[in-house]
Image: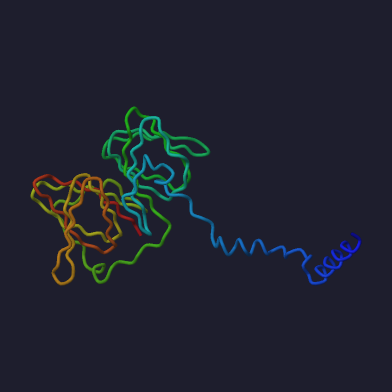
């Protein structure tokens, strides 16, 4: 027994001399974590926080387009977001809760609003489901205009779109077409087109080719800045809402 204890003691001493008993450097754990987590994770997207109430129609480096359908009394948990443009698809009443206070916003169908960047929850205080389109602007830099199209003059229109909102961050236009008519639209700034009705969007490509898109109702289509496109109405009238990201 004594011989075994001496053997163990010799091994322990050798380990200490070799450095096996030394404590690891203080920054070893931090370095390992730094290799795994190079940057803090982004906050979860709104459609992940409330998947039953929020559908993402479009998302890119400049903005995300969301369709929110919130039942009465339901709430979307508090979340962070940038400057937001809102278009009401029906009469609704929404409570925007922040840490400091809550404000009830009442909307009529077709009304627009702009919510400032921040963190808050959204609650439907009305008696019916609230349906709104939300365009959330990100902090990413704007893409430059495409090619020589940016230098050309905007195309004149006999009946210009109805400007619902014009501010430093967004311009929101409503376009209505009678059956069988068409209109050429130019987006000097990047824009997202939300279809209140089915619509046909046409982009003239180089070489004379036409990119024809038959878009369903309640969908979003993205156009870069400096883009010119045409909306065509068939047997039924067409209604669009165009969200332009201002530079």
Q: Is residue 223 left or right of residue 16?
A: left
Name the residue: 54% across, 57% down: 40
- By what rule are the colours in the image chosen? rainbow
Q: Tell me the quarter of the image containing the N terminus.
A: bottom right
On the image, which quarter does residue 150 sit in?
A: bottom left
Q: Nearer the viewer, residue 52 or 131?
A: 52
Q: Residue furthest right?
A: 2
Q: Nearer the viewer, residue 59 or 29?
A: 29
Q: Give the image location of residue 85, x and y in percent.
A: 35, 47
Q: Give the image location of residue 6, x and y in percent.
A: 89, 65
Q: Is residue 74 left or right of residue 227?
A: right
Q: Tell me the quarter of the image containing the C terminus.
A: bottom left
Q: Give the image location of residue 19, x and y in percent.
A: 78, 70
Name the residue: 16% across, 59% down: 212
Q: Is residue 202 left or right of residue 150?
A: left
Q: Give the image location of residue 133, x and y in percent.
A: 31, 44
Name the residue: 22% across, 44% down: 196
On the image, which quarter does residue 11 sit in?
A: bottom right
**Does 111 appear above or below 155?**
above
Q: How many marks?
A: 0
**Does 11 appear above or below 161?**
below
Q: Nearer the viewer, residue 134 or 243?
A: 134
Q: Nearer the viewer, residue 118 or 162?
A: 118
**Does 79 appear above or below 30?**
above
């Amino acid at each position: 027994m004594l011989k075994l204890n001496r053997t163990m003691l010799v091994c322990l001493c050798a380990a200490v001399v070799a450095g096996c008993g030394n404590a690891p450097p203080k920054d070893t754990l931090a370095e390992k974590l730094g290799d795994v987590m190079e940057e803090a994770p982004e906050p979860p997207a709104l459609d992940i926080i409330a998947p039953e109430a929020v559908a993402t129609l479009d998302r890119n480096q400049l903005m995300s387009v969301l369709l929110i359908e919130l039942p009465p009394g339901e709430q979307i948990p508090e979340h962070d977001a940038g400057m937001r443009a809102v278009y009401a698809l029906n009469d609704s009443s929404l409570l925007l809760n922040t840490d400091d206070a809550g404000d009830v916003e009442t909307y009529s169908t077709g009304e627009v609003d702009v919510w400032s960047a921040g963190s808050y929850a959204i609650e439907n205080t009305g008696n019916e489901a609230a349906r709104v389109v939300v365009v959330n602007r990100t902090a990413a830099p704007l893409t430059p205009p495409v090619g020589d199209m940016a230098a050309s003059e905007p195309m004149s229109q006999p009946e210009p779109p109805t400007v619902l909102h014009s501010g430093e961050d967004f311009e929101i236009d409503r376009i209505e077409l009678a059956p069988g008519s068409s209109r050429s639209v130019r987006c000097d700034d990047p824009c997202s087109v939300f279809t209140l009705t089915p619509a046909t969007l046409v982009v003239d490509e180089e070489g004379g080719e036409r990119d024809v898109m038959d878009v369903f109702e309640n969908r979003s289509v993205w156009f870069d800045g400096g883009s010119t496109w045409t909306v065509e109405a068939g047997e039924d009238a067409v209604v669009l809402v165009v969200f332009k990201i201002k530079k």
